[in-house]
Amino acid sequence: MKDDGIGRGGEKEHDFRFRKLTAASAMAPFPAGPLLRLLYSLAFPALLLSGFLCVCLLLLLFGLRLWLQQRKKQQIPSGRDGKRPLVVAFFHPYCNAGGGGERVLWCAIKALQKKYKDVSYVVYTGDAGVTAENILEGAYRRFNIRLNQPVKFVFLRRRYLVEASLYPHFTLLGQSLGSVFLGWEALVNCVPDVYIDSMGYAFTLPLFKYLGGCRIGCYVHYPTISTDMLSVVRNQNARFNNAAVITRNPLLSKLKLTYYYIFASIYGLVGSCSDIVMVNSSWTFNHILSLWRCSDRTSVVYPPCDVQTFLDIPLHEEKNTVEQTIVSVSQFRPEKDHRLQIRAFAKLLEKTAGQELLPKLILIGGCRNQEDEQRVNGLKKLCQDLGIEKRVEFKVNIPFEELKQHLADATIGLHTMWNEHFGIGIVECMAAGTIILAHNSGGPKLDIVVPYEGNITGFLAENEDDYADTMAYIFSLPPTKRLEIRQTARQSVKRFAEQEFEETFLLSVEQLFK
């Protein structure tokens, strides 16, 4: 074979140098000058486009505001004196639900009607299949409240947008964005002068303020997100709103915590749009201040409790020969934790097995929708599984007089919600003369089940064993001691009467009418 002049050794050296040169060329940095010139050349058009889009958005918002103001004039014509009446609207999509929030709504409207007689009042509601007369009759039947003047109802067709069942994941965000669309439907149908969110849909506040041009007020029963919720996710504790699959996975917990922090920041921004903020307890007050940072316009307005009606129930020393009952009064919602009540009651029955007269548990509450009704069926199934169905009764959406009778006959009032914002049902139980046993957190701990003139007003517990042991202890007390606790509790809850609510509520909203 003829030699080509390179040889095998030379060929290898040549290939090695070629590969080294190619690799070095590939690793060489891209020239910085052309890249920077490209970025600089794109920056100005990008800023120009952003500015143009911002101007278009502002013009669109300004146009929508003008259009809404024109609709406002058409919707509410001037009276005989040439003046258009002031319109006050309450956003309460579940006004026919029959819970404590609905009592606040009707008492607030009643108080305003007394003071501001020439004002037109509107309620935005999503309750389908009922008439205005049905809703007002329900308010009287459940709360013994009749309004002094007519109220206009705006029936919303898209309430499903704020149903939790529509958002199996990212529920807080989904419901909040859904409330914006529901709020837009409300605003288009009636543009008020004063807008009051009485159900906790804070994301509607900027909509009515900046597009509707309304003065804004809100009554916060429970913050959409709280620092306690953040701590639950951070500590990977399982709750009804923090699934076990997330608590067991550190990565999912960190992602959810990040989502919660972002949501809390946005929640704080929209909440700060309110001109006046009313909260229902010390617990809610502390959380709203930390999130909304509006201490200059936030005040505690305890919700109205029909204390006097329950105080009229005569107190008498109980007899140990009469069947003793435990009554729970709260809506059938997941956070009320009725399962804890049933399990604790089952443990109490184990402790009292063999006694001639066993206690009975009566669960009283309202159902808002099919989801709540399914929850009641699930609770009944739990009673059957525990073998206590004969000692547990369910009373759903019962009349006010029947509620009074059950409270009058009960020995213990039971409440198990963790971090209950206030607890109207707790106050009513105490006023009626039951010995209250509530969760050691939130409003019950800070505002309601607190010593009065140095004497105890009730009891607090945290888990099944605590509840079962405390119920057994209450039943073991002498009738004279139980009567003493009931009398003290009655005296302590007078500060939550409807008249007290009217005075503080009217004082808080006064600047909205100036």
Image (cartoon, grey):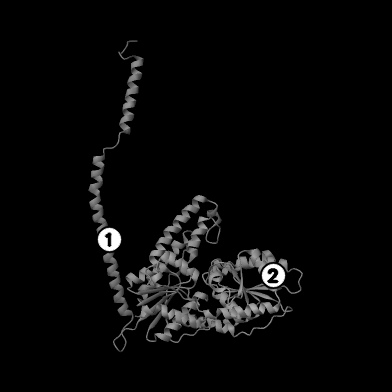
Where's residue 486, x and y in %? 63, 78
Classed neighbour count for the residue bearing mark 2: other residues with Cα under 10 Å, few (<14), some (14–19), many (≥20): some
Q: Amino acid at mark 2?
A: Ala
Classed neighbour count for the residue bearing mark 1: other residues with Cα under 10 Å, few (<14), some (14–19), many (≥20): few
Q: Amino acid at mark 1?
A: Cys
Task: Specify the farthest residue to the top.
Answer: 1
Residue 149, disc: none
**Secondary structure beneath label 2:** helix
Q: In 3D space, how far apart are the residues under numbered discs 2 and 1 (Cα atoms)?
A: 66 Å
The first of marks 2 and 1 along the sequence is: 1
Q: Nearer the viewer, mark 2 or mark 1?
A: 2
* Above-or-below relation of 146 to 472: below
* Above-or-below relation of 329 to 5: below
Residue at the spot x=34%, y=22% of the render?
15
Where's residue 40, x and y in %? 24, 47
Where's residue 6, x and y in %? 31, 15
Q: Which residue is mark 2?
A: 472
Residue 433 in view (yes/no): no
Is 262 on the left or on the right of 74, as rendered?
right
Q: Quadrant of the C terminus?
A: bottom left
Residue 54, disc: 1
**Secondary structure beneath label 1:** helix
The residue nearer to you, when weighing 109 against 471, is 471
Residue 491 placement: quadrant: bottom right
